[in-house]
Each structure stands twice: as C-alpha cells, then as structure tokens.
Image (cartoon, rainbow, N blue to C red):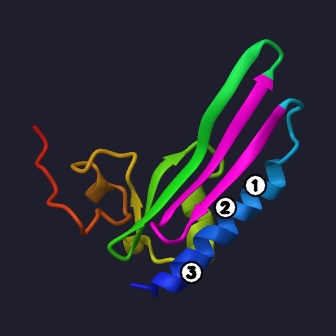
Amino acid sequence: MGTLATYRQVVQEVLTAYYQETAGAMAGVERQLVLDPTRDHYLLMTVGWEQNHRVDGCVLHLDIKDGQIWIQHDGTERGIANDLLERGIPKADIVLAFHAPYKRPFTGFGVGRDQAEPQAA
C-alpha cells in the first residue's frame, strides 16, 4: 500500500492530464475538474450544451478509501486504471468499484478493504 499523499498526488496529476487533453474539445461544452483532497473525492465532469441538447455528466470519478484508489466511474476509452498502473500504483490498491463486489476478485485488481464483500446470489 502506498502513502495517502502519494495516491492523492497521482490521482490529481492523472485527472489533470485528462482535463488538459479534453478541455475545449467541444464547442459549448466545458470540462470541470473537481479535486477534493480533504474528503478524497476526484471528478472530471462535462457540462454545457451540444446544439439543443444539455450535456451534464461524469467522465471520471475516483475516491481514495482505506488506502486504495476506487474507480467509481470511468467513461474513457483507454481506462484510467492503466494510467494509475503506469504511475506505479499496485493493482491491489486499485478497486474497480463499478464492478459488483462479488465480481471484483476476478478482475485482478483490489476488492476493497473497507467493507465486507457480499456473496453472489
């Protein structure tokens, strides 16, 4: 398990890179980078208008819980877990939280230490 300060720094750097790569990509739509290291919630949002349609959604949502990085939502093609691995975060400290708890042991990533994992029905 890495240090909390290191994980905060890595998560913020990776999300900032995504933000910089995609900011201004669509006219009328902005990216919003939300970094809350006090509560360990990190988001990349899309907000605005595309022609006559409202755009408001989450691109990336990560939390740091109990010494692990929880990927709550990943709306990217390449997968933010790969970026975290490239930055030296161990697989055991990355939880693919968008998978049901009973499926997580089969992902090769962490399963989450902060809650008891329910059994599959």
- Nearer-the-camera pick, 55 or 82: 55
Q: Are marks 1 and 2 in contact (CB under 8 Å)?
A: yes
What's the residue type where badge 1 is placed? Answer: Tyr
- Give the residues in magenta: 29-49
Which residue is label 3 attached to?
88
Q: Nearer the viewer, mark 1 or mark 3?
A: 1
Residue 72 versus residue 94 in the image, above or below: above
- The picture places residue 84, in percent across and down from the top left corner, at 57, 69
- Quadrant in which the N terminus appears: bottom left
- Quadrant in which the C terminus appears: top left
Residue 49 versus residue 5 in the image, above or below: above
Which residue is label 1 attached to?
19
**Mark 1 neighbour class, 10 Å CA radius: few under 14, some 14 to 19, many 20 or more:** some
Magenta stretch: includes residue 46: yes
35 with respect to 48 (left or right): left
Identify the mark at residue 15; answer none if there is no mark.
2
What's the residue type where badge 2 is placed? Answer: Leu
Question: At x 83% / y 16%, what residue is drawn?
Answer: 51
Magenta stretch: includes residue 94: no
Question: At x 83% / y 48%, what residue is drawn?
Answer: 23
C-alpha distance separating marks 2 and 3:
16 Å
